[in-house]
Image (tube, rainbow, N blue to C red):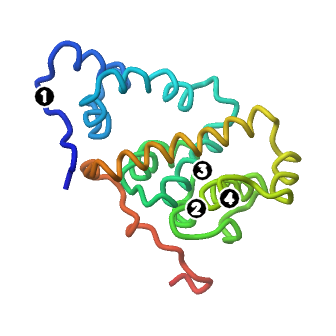
């Protein structure tokens, strides 16, 4: 149940303008943005950074981005934001059902991860979540696979989605209608069960 209720339409002119700016054209505003709109100065301030994190200027690929976001949100227990990203982006970036399950409940060593790059992204999200840094071994591996720009984008992307997760969890944002849930994705053992 929401602790901070999302705004309901009809919106006043300023709120409606802000919500339209936060969404793709013609798409109704999601519950999280309607919650953020309770503090319009904050919602406006978040726009440029959120636009960068999800935009074309980010040095990481869309797939890299979604692996980091899905893992970070799952580790933060933010089913809301995880579900939004799985629903809108998982198919686009070719995340398989076993990979989504692994990002949600598994490990970078799960058999579904076929590239070292994907495994390193998961390790990065886990290290930042658990220790707020990387150790020298992980740092060396990351430095051999990613540019400095990609690493900086990865660090801040994980931090941004920690902040989003904290806000969504603490505000009690309900799941979007029809959104996937953590329980819908399980890691299957070698026997397929």
Residue corresponding to mark 1: 9
Q: Residue at x 64, y 69 (%)?
A: 107
| Mark 3 vs 2, N-terminal side | 3
Residue corresponding to mark 4: 127
Q: CA distance from mark 3 to mark 2?
A: 9 Å
Q: Residue at x 23, y 14 (%)?
A: 14
- Closer to the observer: label 2 or label 4? 4
* Percent position of residue 69, x then y: 54, 47
- Closer to the observer: label 2 or label 1? 1
Q: Is residue 105 above or below residue 82?
A: below
Q: CA distance from mark 1 to mark 3?
A: 33 Å
Residue corresponding to mark 2: 99
- Closer to the observer: label 1 or label 4? 4
Tell me which corner region of the image, top left, top right, bottom left or bottom right, holds residue 44: top left
* Percent position of residue 70, x then y: 52, 52
State if disc 3 and disc 1 touch (CB < 8 Å): no
Disc 3 is placed on an element classified as helix
Q: Is residue 82 above or below residue 19?
A: below
Q: Residue at x 58, y 86 (%)?
A: 191
């Amino acid at each position: 149940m929401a602790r901070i209720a999302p705004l309901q339409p009809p919106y006043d002119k300023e709120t409606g303008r802000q919500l339209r700016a936060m969404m793709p054209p013609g798409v109704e505003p999601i519950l999280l943005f309607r919650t953020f709109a309770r503090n319009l100065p904050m919602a406006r301030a978040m726009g440029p950074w959120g636009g960068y994190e999800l935009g074309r200027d980010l040095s990481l690929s869309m797939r890299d981005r979604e692996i980091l976001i899905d893992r970070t949100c799952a580790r933060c227990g933010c089913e809301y934001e995880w579900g939004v990203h799985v629903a809108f982006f998982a198919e686009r970036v070719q995340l398989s059902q076993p990979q989504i399950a692994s990002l949600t409940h598994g490990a970078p060593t799960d058999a579904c991860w076929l590239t070292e790059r994907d495994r390193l992204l998961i390790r990065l999200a886990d290290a930042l979540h658990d220790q707020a840094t990387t150790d020298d071994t992980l740092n060396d591996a990351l430095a051999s696979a990613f540019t400095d720009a990609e690493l900086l984008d990865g660090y801040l992307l994980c931090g941004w989605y920690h902040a989003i997760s904290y806000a969504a969890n603490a505000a009690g944002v309900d799941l979007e209608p029809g959104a996937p849930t953590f329980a819908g994705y399980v890691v299957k053992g070698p026997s397929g069960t």
